[in-house]
Amino acid sequence: MKRSDNRRSFVHYLPVYGCWSTGIIYVAIGVIAVLSFLRVRKGGADESSLLAILNDHVAGKILFWVILSGTVCYVAWRIFESIKDPYSYGKGLKGIALRSGIAMSTIPDALLAMSAVRILMGTGNIRTDGRPVELRQMVGELLQKTSGDVAIVAIGVVIFLSALVQFFYGITNGYKERLDIGHLSRDMKWLTHFLAWIGYGARGVILGIIGFFFIKAGLMKSSGYVVNTDKAFDFIGDHVGHLYFILLAIGTTGYGLFMFILGWFYDPDKD
């Protein structure tokens, strides 16, 4: 891969580190989901809960900081990407829409970083068992405000649309422009695409469920409907079937593995 100057070489490390930290998160969540299904542990298959679990152990604190710093790096890269436009999306209507989507995609990562800060400060009621207590409290407080229900529905719509984007991104191979894997073997290419397909599919399902219940919480004016990743897994297991729960866990783990590959072979521009 060509690198024309030191600045570009430095910026390239931001998405690499960010992808790897994301990979750690979702491989761990997929494994925790399977352990919960096997009743080895009770819940915790959620991004914020994972950080709370890690923060409870000395060795885990190291991984906690790896994930937090990697998440911040990834947010910084996506903002840089939306402003500098290294993939030449342009300033037309489509280009602006794509770059705006890139900027909006930083929201989940930014929220994860905020959760990590609250855990460090001891101000967040984030549980290690995956129960969305803090999230429901925040939604409950928002519902007490004028037009709070409208805001909750709007958040749900944005999350649901992001789920559709995940499906679209996987189906259309939109991730390919960020991958420099032309030199890999055919089997390795196939594995990379397979992990991307099942990974983006799983993320789409989870975000779709979360978005749907945010919309329901706003319409019903009740925070009790709000779910996080852990409860999205439970919804699939309880109402769709155990097989689909396992497939969703495998897909989530696949997403994490794909992010490791994406980080290793990340192409920061169209060179």
Image (spheres, helix red, strand yellow):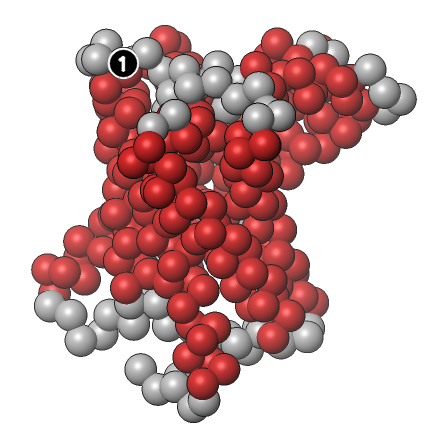
Q: How many marks?
A: 1
* Residue 100 image-quadrant placement: bottom right
Q: Secondary structure at mark 1?
A: loop
- In the rendered image, the residue lying farthest to the right is 146
Viewer-nearest residue: 22 or 201: 22
**Quick one: label 1, few (<14), some, or many (20+) residues within 10 Å?**
few
- Residue 162, percent across and down? 55, 42
- In the rendered image, the residue lying farthest to the front is 58
| Residue under the image location 17 percent in, 57 percent down | 190
Q: Which residue is mark 1?
A: 41
Whether residue 248 is visible, yes or no, is: no
Tell whether 111 sits left or right of 46.
Answer: right
- Residue 5, percent across and down? 45, 89
Location of the C terminus (image quadrant): bottom left
Tell whether 55 sits left or right of 116.
Answer: left
| Residue under the image location 57 percent in, 26 percent down | 122
Q: Looking at the picture, which amino acid does disc 1 mark?
A: Arg
Q: Is residue 52 above or below residue 100?
A: above
Tell whether 259 sits left or right of 206.
Answer: left
- Residue 205, percent across and down? 42, 32
Q: Is residue 146 above or below residue 192?
A: above
* Residue 24 image-quadrant placement: top left
Tell whether 41 sits left or right of 149.
Answer: left
- Residue 42, percent across and down? 32, 11
* Residue 216 image-quadrant placement: top right
| Residue under the image location 37 percent in, 63 percent down | 16
Whether residue 97 is visible, yes or no, is: yes
| Residue under the image location 10 percent in, 60 percent down | 187
Location of the N terminus (image quadrant): bottom left
